[in-house]
Image: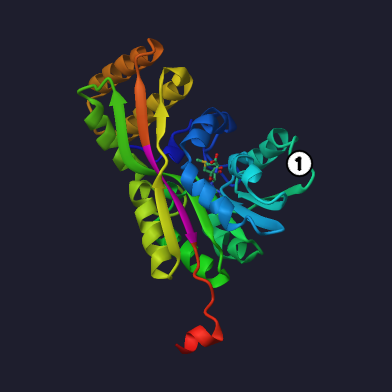
Amino acid sequence: MAGLGCLVRQRPRGGTGMSAFAAQWLDLREPADRRARNADLLATVARHFSDHAQIAVTDLGCGTGAMMRTLAPRLPARQSWRLVDQDTGLLDAVEQRCREMPPAMAWQPHQADLQEDLEAVMALPADLVTISALLDLTSIAWLERLAEAAATHQRPVYATLTYNGRIACEPADPFDAQVACAFDAHQRRDKGFGHASGPLASTQAIEQLAARRFIVRQADADWVLDDSERALQAELVQGWYQAACEEDVLDRQKLDGWLARRLAAVRAGRTRLTVGHCDIWAYPPAPRSRSSSRS
Ligand SMILES: C[S@@+](CC[C@H](N)C(=O)[O-])C[C@H]1O[C@@H](n2cnc3c(N)ncnc32)[C@H](O)[C@@H]1O
């Protein structure tokens, strides 16, 4: 079904530094995101940096700073974060949500359009580049640029919560598959980076990084939403409906009926939604020493 980055109440795009992502949507999904991030991979990333006295992180498409809130307690205490987003409203929202960060932590907002400025941002000093819930909005061309820039500057990349195309709705509805199909088509629309990779994004990112000799690990990071998360379930279902309406390929009456049934099941606490995501951890190979390069 959907690249979940796009499951938001859309705001019109303009030249105002605002994107289509609402802080309320990011707040709503943050607990589910936090649970979903793969714990083993997160521990592996933490171990990789455990002997660093300090660490500088660049977070691409930071939203309200959820990645920093999740990862900071796992990294060396002295941290500096560069939080990159095109949306000035979301960058302002970071301030409200990160007032309680430990004193050894510094962060700075950095407004940039990552379609235009990716290479410039990747060139800025960083020990680690993080990405969360963004890759599925991007394109194969952008993923290639990301991998190339990561290789050029030897930046490890931790990219979480990339939607991978697996959706399971319980109880099942006979119209689910058609909505899913319409939604898939919508997901591939341009989200500002060219034709979106959608569910193929993590596979494509892995290929691009591996082609540049990065050591890459991937792991499942699924959302599993039970009836304790009815608000998030309802937003998801309405987002799928909205996308299917915009695709305009389904009988509207049937689509409306599907939405009514799905929302009724959510309200009754009878729904469980599983949404597949992939986390990726990729780091460049250690530079070869003179002696090993001779062998
Ligand atoms: C689904 S949200 C994820 C936010 C955050 N990483 C998280 O996990 O909560 C995608 C984010 O990417 C940002 N974004 C989308 N297109 C962008 C672009 N072209 N340049 C910079 N940021 C962009 C959005 O503003 C939004 O904050």
Task: Check disc 1 and report the residue beneath it.
Answer: 102
Query: Quick one: which residue is furthest to the top in this view?
Result: 268
Lateral position of residue 289 relative to residue 161, left or right: right
| Quarter occupied by residue 289 | bottom right
The percent coordinates of residue 179 (x first, y second) are 27, 30
Q: Is residue 186 magenta?
A: no
Judged from the image, the secondary structure of the residue bearing numbered disc 1 is loop
| Quarter occupied by residue 245 | top left
Query: Quick one: which residue is furthest to the left in this view?
Result: 174
Task: Report the predominant secondary structure element of the magenta stretch.
Answer: strand
Q: Which residues are magenta?
A: 276-282
Of residues 289 and 138, which is closer to you in this image?
289
In the depicted structure, whether residue 50 falls above or below residue 259: below
The percent coordinates of residue 174 (x first, y second) are 19, 23
- The total of numbered circles placed on residues is 1
- Quadrant position of the N terminus in the picture: top left
x 32%, y 41%: residue: 165
The percent coordinates of residue 90 (x first, y second) are 63, 39
x 57%, y 30%: residue: 27
In the depicted structure, whether residue 269 falls above or below residue 192: above
x 58%, y 51%: residue: 46
Can you see residue 217? yes
Q: Is residue 277 magenta?
A: yes
- Quadrant position of the C terminus in the picture: bottom left
Amino acid type at image mark 1: Pro
Ligand 1 image position (quadrant)? top right
In the depicted structure, whether residue 227 falls above or below residue 34: above
